[in-house]
Image (spheres, coloured by chain):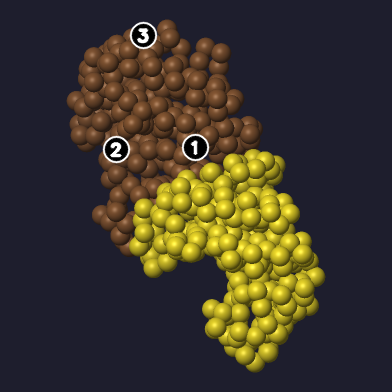
Chain colours: A brown, B yellow
Amino acid sequence: MIFIGERVNAGFKDIKEAIINKDGDVIKEWTRKQADAKADYIDVNLGTASNKPEDLCWMIEMVQEEVDLPISIDNNKPVMLKEAVPVCKKPPLVNSTTADDKKMDELLPIVAEHNASIIGLVMDEAGSPNSADKRVENAGKIFAKIMEYGMSPDQLFLDPIVMPLKFMQDQAREILKGAAQFQLFSDPPCHIVCGLSNISNGTTHKKLINRVFAAMLIANGLDAVILDVMDEELVNTILTADLIMNKGIYADSYIEAFRK
Amino acid sequence: MIFIGERVNAGFKDIKEAIINKDGDVIKEWTRKQADAKADYIDVNLGTASNKPEDLCWMIEMVQEEVDLPISIDNNKPVMLKEAVPVCKKPPLVNSTTADDKKMDELLPIVAEHNASIIGLVMDEAGSPNSADKRVENAGKIFAKIMEYGMSPDQLFLDPIVMPLKFMQDQAREILKGAAQFQLFSDPPCHIVCGLSNISNGTTHKKLINRVFAAMLIANGLDAVILDVMDEELVNTILTADLIMNKGIYADSYIEAFRK
C-alpha cells in the first residue's frame, strides 16, 4: 500500500496559521509525525490560506528540510504546479486532474516533463460520475491521455471518487465495481487511489466506516490511499487486507514489524 | 447478512460434556445468548461426542425448546440427516455437501423433500480447490445438481472454502475471485457463505484478520457467515459492510439499532 499522509493541509487550522505566519516548525512537526507513521508521500495542500506559488513552494521546502519523502502536491492549477513541481527533489504526485481534455492538456506536460505521477479523478466537465460505467469511461479517457504524453501506467493513480455513504448510499457499490475494472486497463495495472474519509462524511461511526470501506476497496484493487496515517486501527486494517491479497509475506508479527 | 451462530458445537468442551450428560441447560444457554446476539440460524454440531442420530435430534430439540430460530445441521451423513431434518420445526440448513455426485445424490433428496437449504462446499473427490477457476467449476456442478432436484437458488449456500492465511497465503485472493463469480450463476443469486475463522487459524491477530476478510468477502458477494455472533467488533464490521453494499438503509445509529 502507498500511504499518502493528509495532514499538511490548510484545511487544518494549525497548518493554515503556519502558512500565514511562515512558521515552518508546525509543517515540519506534522511531516515528521507522518513519516514516523510510515507515510510514503506527504500531501501538501495550501487550501484557502494563499494562492501564491511561492507559499506552496515554501511548504514543500519545509517538508523536504525534514524528510526525504516524495511530495503529493494537492493543487490542480498550472500556474502553481509550474513552480512547485521543479522544487520537488523527488518526482512528486500531482493531485489531481479530471478527465477534462483541457485540464489534462494543461497539467500533463508539466507532469510528464518532470517524470512525476498524477492522480486522475474519474469525473469530467459534466461533473461527478454516478455509476460504475461512467467511472470506467472517464478512467479510460485519462488512461489514454497519459499514454499520449508518453507516461507509463505506474505514473497514473486513478481515483474512483468516493462519495459519502450517508448522502449517496448507492454509490459505494459503484465505486467498488468501477475500481475492479480500472485494474484491467493494463498489466501491470495503474495505481488506484482514493481519499478514504469521504465515505464517512457526516456519519457517527466514522473510523469504523473508513476501515471497512478500505478493506473492501483493497479487495477491488486499491493500492494507494490518502489518509490519516496516525490512525493505527485503519493502518492495521490496511496491512491485513494487503496480506490477504498476498502482497508481502505473512509473519505472525506483521503489524509489530511494520511499526518497528 | 445471515448470521449462523457456531457455538453449539461439541468442539467446545462444555457442549461436548452437555451432550454426554444430556444437560440441556448448557445447550439452551448458548442458544439464548446467540439468539440475543441476533443469530439467524443456530448451528448444531455433534462433533466427536456421539454418532447417534438420537443425540443430534436431542440437541435440535433443546435448541427449539429455547428459541424458534431455524437450525443449521452441521452433519453430512444421510443416516443422521434422515432423522434430524424431520425434527426441525423450520426448514433447516444442512451443512454440508461437496460437489461429489454420490454425496449430492444421497443428501439432496432429504433436503429437497423438506424444503430445506444446503451448504455446498466447492470441493470434490479430488480434494480442496486451489484456484478460483476450480472453485467456480465445483460451484457450477453443485448449482446444476440442486436445479435437478427442483430446488431454487436461494436454497443453496455456496462455500468457497476458506483456507488459513498463515499456511496458504495465496488462497485468500482465489477465494475472493471465486466468490465474485458465484454471484453470476443466477439472478437473484444463490447465497454465499463461509466458515470465517478458518482464515485466521494459527495467527496472532485472529480477530482483526477475521474482520478484514469478512469485509473483503462481502464486497465479493458473501451474504451468510458461520461465526461467533458474540464478537461485537466482527458483527459491527459486517453491519457496516452491508450498508456499504447498499443493503439496508443508512441511519447514523445503525449499530445501536441492530443491538436493540
Contact check, label 1 and label 3, Cβ < 8 Å: no
Residue A5 in the image: above or below residue B61: above
Task: Identify which residue is drawn at 46% across, 12% down.
Answer: A100
Residue B259 in the image: above or below residue A37: below
Q: Amino acid at mark 2?
A: Asp
Q: Is residue A147 left or right of residue B82?
A: left
> Image quadrant for the C terminus of chain A?
bottom left
Q: Is residue A169 left or right of residue B151?
A: left
Task: Identify which residue is drawn at 68% across, 74% down.
Answer: B81
Q: Are marks 1 and 3 on the same chain?
A: yes
Q: CA distance from mark 2 to mark 1?
A: 18 Å
On the image, numbered disc 1 is attached to which residue?
A197
Task: Identify which residue is drawn at 54% across, 78% down.
Answer: B11
Chain ID, mark 1: A
Q: Amino acid at mark 3?
A: Glu
Contact check, label 3 and label 2, Cβ < 8 Å: no
Q: Earlier in the sequence, mark 3 or mark 2?
A: 2
Can see residue A90? yes
Q: Is residue B91 left or right of residue B239?
A: right
On the image, numbered disc 2 is attached to which residue?
A40
Give me the disc on residue A47.
Answer: none
Q: Earlier in the sequence, mark 2 or mark 1?
A: 2
Q: Residue B107: which quarter of the image?
A: bottom right
Can see residue B225? no
On the image, numbered disc 3 is attached to which residue?
A106
Q: How far from the left and from the top, in percent, is residue A81?
A: 31, 15
| Label 1 crowd bin: few (<14), some (14–19), many (20+), radius 10 Å | many
Disc 1 vs disc 3: which is toward the camera? Answer: 3
Chain ID, mark 2: A
Q: Secondary structure at mark 3?
A: helix
Q: Secondary structure at mark 1?
A: helix
